[in-house]
Amino acid sequence: MNALTRIFRRLEGPQTLGRGPFFWVGFLVVLVGACAYPLLSDGYTVGNTVYFFTWIFMALGLCLIWGYGGSLSFGQTAFFGIAGYGYGILTINFGAAYGFTFVALVLAMALAALFAALLGYFLFFGRISGVFLGIVTLSVTLVLERFMAQTAGPEWRIGSARLNGFNGMSNMPPLTIPWPGGDIVLFPDVQLYYVVLGLLVVVYLALRILVNSPFGNVLVAIRENPERAEMLGYDIRKYQLGTFVIGAALAGLSGVLYTSWGQYITPSSMGMTAAALPIVWVAVGGRSDLTTTLIGTLTVLAVFQALTIYGSQYALVVMGAMLVLTVLLAPSGLILALARLIARPFAKRQPGDA
Amino acid sequence: MPLLETRALNKRFGGLHVTNNVDLVLKTGEVHCLIGPNGAGKSTLFRLILGEHLPSSGSILFGGEDITALKPFQRIRRGMSVKFQVPGIFKALSVRQNLEIAMQHHYEPATLGDEIGRLLDFLNLSVDAERLAGNLSHGQKQWLEIGMAISLKPRLLLLDEPTAGMSPEETHATGEMVKRLNAEGMTVLAVEHDMAFVRQVADQVTVLHLGGVFAQGSIDDIVADERVAAIYLGQSTAHATAHEQPGGVHA
């Protein structure tokens, strides 16, 4: 019991909205609702919902790097793509037996993290920050897109995996759980839903613990005033690099889940449009908080899909308009502004904090 | 042994010779004030000591160790701490969190809360602990940053115009605080314009002029030195107004 309260205390802190029994009861209600959802729906719709979920990891990673750490990375999709292709290459070559798909998932994430560590080392130890960080990371992801797009020829193969240029790589096996009496293949259906939901809960809670830890304290200190943070004795470059790598690994997780979900990955998943979308999700939701990022990402994705179905090519225009409106009306994020509005009657007034 | 020593320290920005052969010795336990007209090179010297600039030539020793090539955070870890002229605080965070960020690696987690409470009392900020630091009054912000600086338990406290923008009462209270910290064993180096403050706290005064050490001694020696008065007066006649030096050396 004592250990449980200690864990609970670590989940709350000044860096996250939502605390106390009220919030956690609400959290449980939502979680139970999410668990019950497949019972009230059909497999096809549930499979589509998983598609939304796969993106949230990348959004949470960006929230950590940008919202908490203050460094705008425009290159999350580079790590997404690297991990996606990495998963494809590994599983096409080595198959899905003996739970290897999950080994491939971890290896692909590690590959994305390693790439981020190399890139981040030069960025942060070279003291590149602000808009230049955005430019360099965007360039990297566009270069990767261009590179992958010209790999159509048969000479571009790794083992038996053809890279396939602009057409993208396909036919890699989905995530597969080894099981006595027949492996469970996680096609976009109810089983995959539960696996991804489980991952989501774990990642969300782990990130809550991280941002409310001393590490998270330093992270927001760097966002607020990097010079002061350094003058308190912190090597801010290491903190920035660490955050960048964690965020990249999460983008990689999204990439693997996406690739496994559709058994398909293309270079355009790293293109200009793809690279801009995570920024829209996180900004619209409220980048300075994990929960608002999560809710915001789901909301924007749902709106985006509804628009794509009914308004086709206008979806992207609406997306842009949404970003502009957010920046003008609620710079800290629409969901965050909404959360503040709801919380206002419950909040104790602080003297002087209007 | 001196706590801090600069040896033939030079800094050039292009053709501009901002720090000119500065030999500065700071004895352990003293309060040392750096004064001088605007443009005398005080801030640059300060930044050289902190490691924000690297010197063109010369060396800096801290506690006998050559720290010339060390990065700022490494110098802080060796026992320096700084309070900037413009309050360097984390505005969007609460006062308590500001102190927590400063103190979290210097105290055991079990005692951290109590230590923060004690420091809040010392800074007269207990009532404001949960307010956002950006909403504090100017004087309170200055105090908060001083609090963050001293919470590192430094051997050397560097203060860049600690009383800038403070009322005379706040200035005096800050002076008393500096004396109290000094009595507890903290060595202090302050860049300061306010001569009342310098008189209140300084054991030793160094006058910088045109990047070099112009005069050195007790505050009485400095005030009695006619050459020092001349460089300040030269500055004030050259600029017609002397508002950059409130009080001037004769205060």
Image: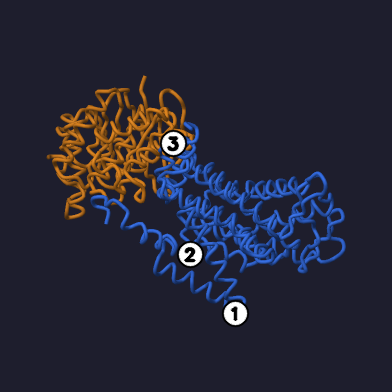
Chain colours: A blue, B orange
Q: Give SS at disc 2.
A: helix
The residue most toward the front is A39
Q: In the rendered view of the protein, which quadrant contains the C terminus of chain A?
A: bottom left
Tag 2: amino acid: Val
Earlier in the chain: of badge 3 and badge 1, it is 3
Instruction: Check whether the beta carbons of the residues at disc 2 and disc 3 lie within 8 A of each other.
Output: no
Determine the CA span between mark 3 and mark 1.
55 Å
**Residue A284 got which mark?**
2
User: Within the image, what quadrant is residue A279 found in?
Assistant: bottom right
Horizontal and vertical percent position of residue B62: 41, 27
Say if B25 sits above or below B159 in the image: above
Q: Between label 3 and label 1, give the one nearer the viewer.
A: 1
Q: Which mark is residue A310?
A: 1
Q: Circle 1 sits in a helix, a strand or a loop, which is it?
A: helix
Pick the residue in front: A42 or A148: A42
Amino acid under label 3? Answer: Gly
Does residue B14 appear in this view?
Answer: no
Callout 1 amino acid: Tyr
Which comes sooner in the sequence, label 2 or label 3?
3
